[in-house]
Image (tube, rainbow, N blue to C red):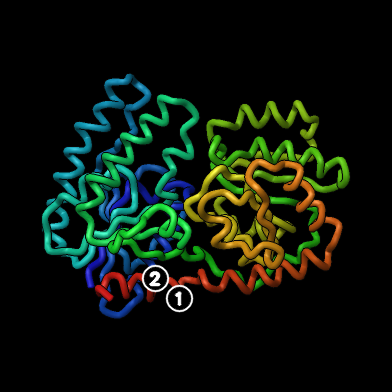
Amino acid sequence: MKIVYCLDSIRGVGGIQRVTVTKANALAGVPGNTVWIVVADTSGEQVYAVSPQVHVADLDIRYYEDDWKSRWNVLKGIFLKRRTHRSRLEALLREIGPDVVVSVGESEKNFLGTIRGKWMKVREIHYAKNYRHLAASSFFERLLAIGGDLYDYHWKIRRYDRIVVLTQGDRNNNWHGEAKVRVIPNPLPFHSEICSPLKDKRILAVGHLTATKNFRSLVRSFRRVSDRFPQWRLDILGDGEERPLLEEEIARLSLEGQVRLRGSVTDIRKEMLSASLLVMTSRFEGFGMALVEAMHCGLPVVAYDCPEGPKAIISDGLNGYLVPPGDESALSERICSLIEDPKKRCRMGIAARISSRRYEIDQIVPMWMDLFSGR
C-alpha cells in the first residue's frame, strides 16, 4: 500500500510533526507499505528522526519566509503560494500513484480533497472541531469562527473519504451522524523502559506559550502550592508569544526562584523522568499528547477538564485528577495532595503507566491499517 502524508513541515519542535513522523515510521515498517511524507518546507532543524524507509519530498513552497516584510507578503503566502502548492502536490501525487493520501497540516487541507484521483483521501483533525469558538474572545472573532466552520466543515471537508478525530468525546459532541468520522488517538512517540522515581521536587508543564495553554492560570495556582511547599519548583517547557506575560506574572507573584520558563526541549522523555507530576491547564485540547507521554513515564497528572482531550485520557482519582476548568484553588489542592502523599503519587504513577499502554504504536498502527483498507 502506498501512503502519502501531507503537511507544512516536519522540522522544529511540535506535536503534529512528532506524531506524523512516528506514524510514518511505523507504517513504513508494515510489510507491503511504502510511505511518503510530503512537506511544503524543509527549512529549520530536523528534530525527529525519520526512518530510512520513509520517502520525504519537499515542494519548496516556503509559506512564511516573507511574512515579516509586509501584509502583502502575508496575503501572497495565503493565496498565490497556495496555488503553487496545489499544482506541485497534484503533479507529485500523479507520479507516485498512492492508495491513500492523508492531510495532516494546515496549508493543504482545503484543497487536497478537491484534487482528483483514485486514492482514498483522509483528513486528520488534531484539535476539537469547535476550537475556533473555544478560542474566540470577541464578537468579531466569534463571527470569524462561524465563517471558518462553514468554509471548512460544511464545504471543503466534504471532499474527503474519511475524517479522523482523536477522541470519542469530540466525535460524540461535534460530529453527530457523520458516517465518515473515525476515532484514532495519537500514538506515543517514544518508548521508555524506565519510569520516574517520583522523588524530585519538580512539577512539569509542557506546551507552546500561548493563551490557549493558559499557563498564567498555572502560575497563579502554583503560588498557593509554593506557600505550602516552598522547596518544590515548576518547570514550563515551550516557547511562544506569551512568554513576556508569563515572566511578568512570575515576577508579580515573586516566584522567580521557583518557576522557570525553560524554552523548547528536544528530549521530553528525559525531562519527564526527572519530574514527579505533570500539570495541564489548557482552555481546550485536541488530545493532550503531553499527558500520555508523562503517564508513560510513570507520572501522575493533574489537568483542567477542558474539551476534549484530558477526560479521554485521565481516569479521575486513578491515574490523575481532572479539575473544573479555571478553578485555580482546586487545581492547587490536587497538586498539593500529590506532593504531601508520596504513596498516593506512586500509586497513581503506576496506574498512569499501565493506562498509557493503549497509546503504544503497536496498538495504533492496526487502527490506521484497518481504515486504509476500508474496514
Looking at the rendering, in which quadrant would you find the C terminus?
bottom left
Q: Quadrant of residue 155?
A: top left
Q: Label 2 neighbourhood size at 10 Å, few (<14), some (14-19), many (20+)?
A: some
* Residue at point 25%, 50% (across, down): 157
Image position, residue 136 (x, y; %): 46, 33
Q: Which residue is mark 1?
A: 362
Q: Secondary structure at mark 2?
A: helix
Q: Label 1 neighbourhood size at 10 Å, few (<14), some (14-19), many (20+)?
A: some
Q: Nearer the viewer, residue 305 or 187?
A: 305
Residue 48 numbered tag: none
Q: Which residue type carries mark 1?
A: Asp
Q: Is residue 11 left or right of residue 271?
A: left
Residue that lies at the very extreme toward the front in this rendered image: 177
* Residue at point 46%, 75% (across, down): 363
Looking at the rendering, in which quadrant would you find the N terminus?
bottom left
Q: Are marks 1 and 2 in contact (CB under 8 Å)?
A: yes
Q: Earlier in the sequence, mark 1 or mark 2?
A: 2
Numbered marks: total: 2
Please say if 65 is above or below 342: above
Q: Nearer the viewer, residue 164 or 38?
A: 164
Residue 26 numbered tag: 2
